[in-house]
Image (cartoon, grey):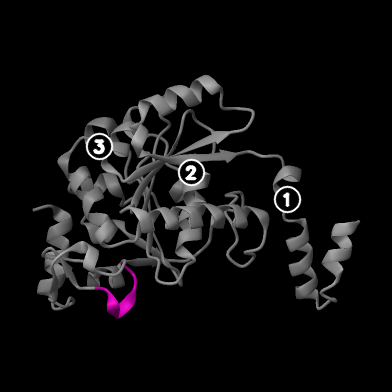
Amino acid sequence: MSRVHDALRRAAQAGELATEHVGHAGAAAPPGGGSSVASVIDGVPTNPGFLDSVQEIAWAPSPDSLLIDPTRPHEAPSEEFRSLRTRLNHMQTLQPIHSIVVTSASPAEGKSFAAMNLALAEAQLAGNRTLLADFDFRRPVIHSLLQISRSPGITDYLLGKAPLEAIIRKVANSNLYVMTAGEAVINPLELLNLREVKQLIEDLPQLFNWVILDTPPLLFAADANLLSTLCHGSILVVRIGATTIDAVTRAMQSLCQNNVLGIVVNGARRGELYSKYTYYHSYYQQKEEGADETEPERARSE
């Protein structure tokens, strides 16, 4: 039995969990749905009380993190990630997709930016418990984006230095949970080959509706290839003007073809990104300022 199962079992024994059983995972509502969620699936609790006691962190991202602002949902970057969220959630209704790898062909293409913002967009939905896990043990950045400590994290858990409860942190007043990379290790690929990694990734979707993994680039390490075989799907991030066709081709070939959910294009020029939202930006800005609602139509015609 894995340490994830052990943690869940301990929570149940402590009286923090109900013990109602259901016969199959498909009979339960998605995690985070409140009292309607069945307490046990195939003998494994899915609403562990220890999530209520994990460390809570304040939302204080780095000023240069380029993360979407939940208080300004109508800005173009937010809309793009909400659109991606909608597509993924629709796919989830067609097939059991709960864990995804977000990676790129090469460094500096925006994979961590995409993973973080996708997790934020998913967590904005009511009851949509979302976990962002930094599996890039080589150059982790999630802890820097959120301005929190790197350890304890995933490597500490895999090395037996920290329990599962200690490496999960919850962003205050949100559905977003985070697992940082943990202490630096000299053998990241060997660590990822541990059976505990497979068990962890298999078990986490019983606690979260979405588990989003930030991983190293495909063409510079085998880590993402390995993790993609353990997850339900993969998303490839490419950067306009930086990612070559050859790099994309090789990256796609390195992934299981039926495991690729799609490609996210990053680095579009601001004018291209914002042009299709001109009408909506004008509309909401005028609404906030109390102006006449007919103003956006005139702005569009100009």
Task: Give the structural element (helix, strand or loop) at label 1.
Answer: helix
Question: Separation of disc 1 and disc 3 at Cα?
Answer: 40 Å
Vertical placement of residue 164 versus 49, above or below:
above
User: Splitting the image into 4 quarters, where does residue 229 fall?
Assistant: top left
- Which mark identifies residue 112? 2
* Labelled pair 1, 3 in contact (Cβ < 8 Å): no
Q: Residue at x 21, y 63 (%)?
A: 25
Q: Residue at x 33, y 52 (%)?
A: 97
Q: Nearer the viewer, residue 5 or 58?
A: 5
Residue at the limit of the structure toward the top, as seen here: 246
Q: Residues within 10 Å of mark 3 (few under 14, many from 20)?
A: some
- Distance of mark 2 from mark 1, alpha carbons? 22 Å
Q: Is residue 176 in the magenta section?
A: no
| Residue type (three-letter) at the residue carrying disc 2 | Ser
Query: Closer to the camera, 32 or 65?
Result: 32
Q: Which one is earlier in the sequence, the residue at label 3 or at label 2?
A: 2
Q: Which residues are magenta?
A: 31-37
